[in-house]
Image: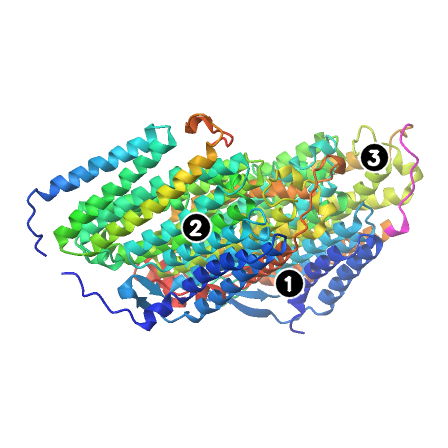
Amino acid sequence: MTPSAFAVPIENYIGLSAVIFFLGVTGVIVRRNPLIMLMSIELMFNAANLALITFAKAWVNAAGHIFAFLVITVAAAEAAIGLAIVVVVFRRAAHVDVDEIATLHG
Amino acid sequence: MTGLVTALVLGPILVGFVLYALPKGADAGAKWAGVAVAALAVALTLGNPHTPDDSVPWLARPFGAAFHFGFGAISYWIVVLLQVATFSALVALRATRLREYTAQMLVLLGAMTGVFLAKDLLLFALFWDLMLVPVFLLMVGWGLPGGGPRRAGTAAWRYLIYNLAGGLCLLLATAAFGIVHGSTDVIGNPDAHVVIGNVWGAWIFAGFAFAFLVKTPVFPFHTWMPATYGELPPPVVAVVSGIQSKAGLYGFIVIGLPFFAEQMRAATPLVVALGIISLLYGAFTALAQSDAKRVVAYSSLSHLGLILIAIFSFDQVAIAGAVVYIVAHGLFSAALFLVLGYVEEREETRSLQRLGGLGYGNPRLAGALVFAALAALGLPGLAGFAGELLILTGLYHAGFGAVALIALVPIVVAAAYMLRLFQGIMNGPKVADLPERRDLTWIEGLAVAPLVLGFILLGIDPAPVAGLASDAARALTGPQTPVSHRAQPRRSETESAYVAADSVR
Amino acid sequence: MSPPIPYVNSADLHALLPTTVIAAAGLLALVVDLFMSAGRARRWIAVAIAAAGLVIAGVLTAQQYGHSYPAFGGAYMQGGFAVVLGEIAIFATLVSLGLGIGIGRDDQVAGTTAIVLWSTCGALLMAGAGNLMMIFLGLELLSLGLYCLCAMSVRSAARESGLKYLLLSSMASGFLLYGMALLFGGTGSVALAAISAAPPSPLIALGAGLFLVGIAFKLSLVPFHSWTPDVYEGAPLSVTAYMSVVTKAGALGVLGRFAYAALPPATANAILLPVWTVAAISMIVGNLAALQQIDMKRLLAYSGIGQVGYIVAAFAGQTPLGLRYAIFYLAAYTFMNLGAFAVVALMLKDADGSLGVGAFAGLAYRRPWLAAAMTFFLLSLAGLPPTAGFTGKILILASSVGAGYWWLSVLLIAGTAISVYVYFKIVRAMFVRVDEAHVRAERSTNPLPWISIAVCAAAVFVLGIYPLAPSDIIPLAK
């Protein structure tokens, strides 16, 4: 179980991925433009990818790499569907803002 | 005849559903089918008192349970009473949508029979909750609210929420009982050897007791009762007040006494205090009511308080008296509510201020009311007296002399409010602007007759009921099983619960 | 140090056979639709193909009962409780498709049907998932389909609900995924079983926490529930019915396996205590919020939040019987909830519409059979006898009391007391005397919901009076 050598300490990779993750979370919560929100969600996914790959290298376990590929594929599908729905919802609107769609009183 | 007891429970429910499926026009037929079911049930119950129990396994884990029905020494006469009261309620029924009405009444009959004949706690809890539903639906569909149809259902809500709160506590307590004891198939089973530890026992008993006290009802849980009795149509209230309200008292006798004797003794001061408050509060409030149905409703509060005290006295005679009084009260309160229903049907009011002078032109109606009122106030020779006498004797024996003395007060007050009720309706000046009245019809007479006959017979000779109940009471209160579980090495309560649960896995 | 990659053999493929059949049925429905001319027959053909596929998959799944096998090196656990959850998902898919004979316009039905079937595949994968990748794959397969289905309708509310669901659910997936990455970091393996073997570390605790947040969102437990009523209200009725059961079946499978098989016993109670707390809050808040609803779909959404609280409460203490009773209650919930949805579908002319509670006024006198069925389902939802809801609740109470979680059972009772008010509001409306002129009465011409009602009512009754056999055949954990 000896982690293989890292040129940069492993903490830095994980720290970066945590920062990206929280950027993503903040983006989803703070921004009101659904496109930016979708991008922030991608950030969350990619933060997880970075962590997965780092850990995969640390544990010398290819499962993490495979997982990361899986996530990339799924994230692409998610982005495609997300953009399609955004287009459908805002087709008639001049600009996009989630606060302006309030038919449903959440 | 095996299967008979189960048939008494499920039969009416099934017939109820069949009636519901009949075409819309079949009102009269549905009603007479209902009457026939009730009459058949009475005949079968009276004809086969020694029917063996029916038992089919139900749950094996997390605790044992069975579909176990059977006649018990205490439940037998209550069930007969229930069937007779349902017959009386149905026979002279006049209402819109009779088909649905009768169907609901039959479901109610079956569910309540289930409560009294269940020998398994889980089954008891099942029917306990089930019997609320038809009453709720009857109140919503046919209720007579004080504030007109717009207010229909407010009392129904109160009824349902109060009683379901009780029912859910009962459910939780039943589940906990099952986990601790390992089986719920224990009612009326002398070999059950139920040992509930002190820590759990108090909470489990509290759950049962809350359900029973709300159902009875006892002060301060009674606030649902006057509005419910006022709004329910008279035939339904005859059954609800006559029998459903006894389910709590029955529960104290068959569940509380054998399994929670210690906890019941500990709770005695509190419950007796509540009983005395109900007794006095009910009696004096009844004196001040102007709504005829509410007079009887509050008188019930008072009478049932007395029965509750009798049960908590742990005296064999008092408990036998309690059972006699349960049956007696069921008979005369059903009769009272039915007759008041006939009065209301004729006069379209039940206010004692508006009513008056009805007795001059309606001797038969007045006769029925006076009989029921006399039984209610405890006239010697009628059933109420027999029950009261046994209870007071028992209380005195058991060292509750002071309570027995206090209990005399409401008995005197009962005479006052019952006579006031009778006078207010039947005597006094005739009220000119009320519609023309008909006397009691033969079919209404047929409805009241079995109830009146019942409390006369029971008043003359309470032995059949008292004898059975007394034997049962001796078994319940007699030499208490020595607290053998004390001798066992003490396990933690949770641990023993797991062991109990494991043993049935 | 990773284990050698196992060769895929026929047993592995056999484990995924039901899923494959369902996916293939979706493809077939799409292809056949290409050769169909316009008309109502298109709906029926697509739904018939889907139904055939689902029935075959149901039979195949049933054959896996009792044959536990860790397929693909433990990625997919065949047999065990996945069989029951799979059957629940398959049944719910069938019923949902029947509510409106497919979803959407005539020319859309084949597409929507295929999406529904593929979503069901996702739920089946989740129910049997034995490692983190399979969980993620199943979850996304299920969710991606649902985003599309929610946004299918032409109503702006539906599209809005689709977008809302997409954004919030993806964020939850993000949490779940990051939690998975941390769990992988803590254990060095994606297998769930590896987590319990690994030494406790902050990575595992944090990862499990994020993972559970994601699952709580998918289950719509209370602080993470705000999307549920809006999405349920906006989505077409069939989709709402589908979501209310299938997502729960999948997510409960994941939660069950995670709580029972993945967490090390030493730290499991500390990690899971927040979950039980959240479940308890859901029972109370879900039912309280349901009190104020006048739209049936919103009401059922909030009631579902409360019901999920009950189910999760059965896990408390991780007793072997607890998982069994949770699944039993989920089965009961499936039947009573879908039954109620079928009644609602019969009261709508257009399956895409919405229904207020007011439409039930006097229903008992206009359509007695429908009212009787609805009363029965509502009794079950409220936990009254003689229904599956009643016995399910007794079993959950017994299990949580037996595990020492008194406070959970007391809150369960409190939540039930509140829910009685919710459900009896409708019962009362059905039986109260009303002026018929004021009631907006619609009828559906689709006969299929009647079959669903009959099946669901029979199941609710049988599970209600005889829970011994059904609850005992549900396999125990692991």
Question: Measured along the vertical axis of the image, is residue B29 above or below residue B238?
Answer: below
Pointer 1 local density, CA inside 10 Å: few below 14, some 14–19, many at least 20: some
Q: Name the residue rendered at 65%, 67% in the picture.
A: B5
Is C215 on the left-hand or right-hand side of C434? Answer: left
Residue located farthest toward the bottom when viewing the structure as drawn: B1
Pointer 3 local density, CA inside 10 Å: few below 14, some 14–19, many at least 20: some
Could you tell me residue A41's position as x and y percent? Answer: 31, 38
At mark 3, the secondary structure is loop
Is C236 on the left-hand or right-hand side of B486? Answer: right
Q: Name the residue rendered at 28%, 35% in the picture.
A: A24
Q: Tell me the quarter of the picture where residue B413 sits.
A: top right
Magenta stretch bounds: B433-443
At mark 2, the secondary structure is helix
Is C228 on the left-hand or right-hand side of B306? Answer: left
Q: Tell which of A66 and B395 is nearer to you.
A: A66
Q: Which numbered marker is on residue C247?
A: 2
Q: Name the residue rendered at 47%, 50% in the picture.
A: B205
How much space separates mark 1 and mark 2, taking CA atoms?
58 Å
Q: Is any part of residue B257 visible from this angle?
A: no
Q: Chain of mark 3?
A: B
Could you tell me residue C324's position as x and y percent? Answer: 41, 60
How much space separates mark 2 and mark 3, taking CA atoms?
56 Å
Q: Tell which of C441 and C54 is nearer to you.
A: C54
Could you tell me residue C257's position as x and y percent? Answer: 33, 57
Main secondary-structure element of the magenta-colored stretch: loop
Q: Chain of mark 1?
A: B
Q: Which residue is mark 3?
A: B348
Q: Tell me the quarter of the picture where residue B96 sits.
A: top right
Q: Which residue is mark 1?
A: B468
